[in-house]
Image (tube, rainbow, N blue to C red):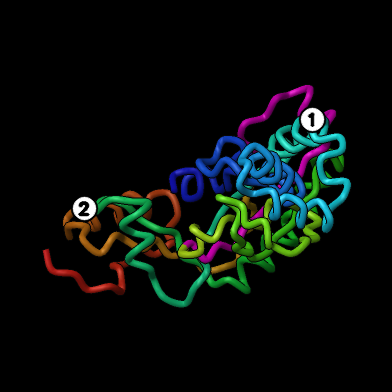
């Protein structure tokens, strides 16, 4: 939040640094790993045969595919948002505590702004990265479902395992050129927010104490008096 309010910037995190180990890996790579596991389990011979018939070249070049998959994770950087009209108590409970806050924006206004701002960011970076924004799709990836149909994602970062479906994620993605990453070994990329023209609210945790919310209001107003600090819409009893 401090980066957003005080420094007016978004922080994008490299995919291999997130908690989900299959972030950004292709379905082909996950399917190949699953097939190897099935091959090592003698009772799955029929299932192995079915998969090999559907994907006859799946294990060819597996080692190079694995290496490229892990490398591709290091070329993709995500900034993640919960996308819904209402707050989620599950998200508050999973990713915060009673002293936490969430940044709230109107999706269409924010997406319009960030898409235009990204054009300038790409130019300023010397066209060494791409910006993409889209909803995340949730699929049975971990453990991998061998019956999953073939997927055609241009950017593998826009899928996650079904166990994360509660996140209802809208993702901002920076995909950077390999030579630039090889040179700098970025772990995070900071995206400047200039001439902000969309509404921003800071929503306090449903159980945050009133005096803490008041202090937060005073602090935020010193840096940006256009940002409102508000109570959660979820009513809770202490």
Query: Residue 86's quadrant in the figure?
Result: bottom left
Q: Position of residue 13 (x, y in %)?
A: 59, 40
Which contiguous range is marked in magenta? 167-191
Instruction: Work out whether residue 217 or residue 86 is closer to the camera in this orientation and state it.
Output: 86
Query: Residue at 70% across / 54% down in the picture?
Result: 46
Badge 1: few (under 14), some or many (20 or more) residues near its Cα, within 10 Å?
A: few
Disc 1, SS: helix
Residue positioned 83% across, 31% down in the render = 64
Lower position in the chain sequence, tag 2 or tag 1:
1
Tag nearer the camera, 2 or 1: 1
Task: State how many labels appear.
Answer: 2
Q: Is residue 225 left or right of residue 185?
A: left
- In x, y percent, where is residue 70? 71, 34
230 shown above or below 54: below
In this figure, which residue is indicated by the disc labeled 1? Answer: 63
Q: Which mark is residue 212?
A: 2
Query: Does residue 71 appear in the picture of this structure?
Result: yes
Estimate the spatial distance between the alpha carbons at disc 2 and disc 1, rounded to whole Å: 53 Å
Point out the residue furthest to the top here: 183
Task: List the single residue furthest toward the bottom.
Answer: 85
Quadrant the C terminus occupies: bottom left
- Mark 2 and mark 1 in contact? Answer it, CB < 8 Å: no
Residue 196: image tag = none
């Amino acid at each position: 939040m401090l980066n957003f309010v005080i420094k007016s910037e978004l922080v994008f995190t490299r995919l291999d640094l997130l908690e989900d180990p299959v972030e950004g890996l292709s379905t082909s790579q996950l399917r190949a790993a699953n097939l190897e596991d099935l091959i090592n389990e003698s009772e799955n011979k029929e299932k192995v045969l079915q998969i090999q018939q559907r994907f006859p070249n799946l294990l060819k070049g597996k080692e190079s595919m694995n290496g490229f998959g892990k490398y591709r994770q290091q070329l993709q950087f995500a900034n993640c948002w919960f996308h819904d009209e209402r707050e989620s108590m599950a998200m508050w409970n999973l990713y915060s505590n009673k002293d936490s806050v969430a940044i709230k924006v109107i999706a269409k206004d924010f997406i319009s702004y960030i898409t235009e701002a990204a054009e300038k960011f790409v130019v300023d970076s010397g066209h060494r990265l791409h910006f993409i924004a889209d909803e995340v799709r949730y699929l049975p990836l971990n453990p991998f479902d061998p019956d999953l149909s073939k997927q055609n994602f241009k950017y593998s970062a826009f899928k996650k395992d079904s166990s994360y479906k509660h996140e209802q994620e809208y993702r901002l993605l920076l995909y950077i050129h390999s030579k630039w990453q090889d040179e700098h070994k970025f772990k995070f990329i900071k995206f400047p927010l200039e001439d902000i023209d969309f509404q921003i609210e800071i929503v306090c945790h449903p159980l945050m104490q009133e005096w803490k919310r008041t202090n937060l209001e005073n602090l935020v107003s010193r840096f940006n008096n256009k940002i409102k600090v508000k109570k959660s819409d979820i009513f809770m009893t202490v």
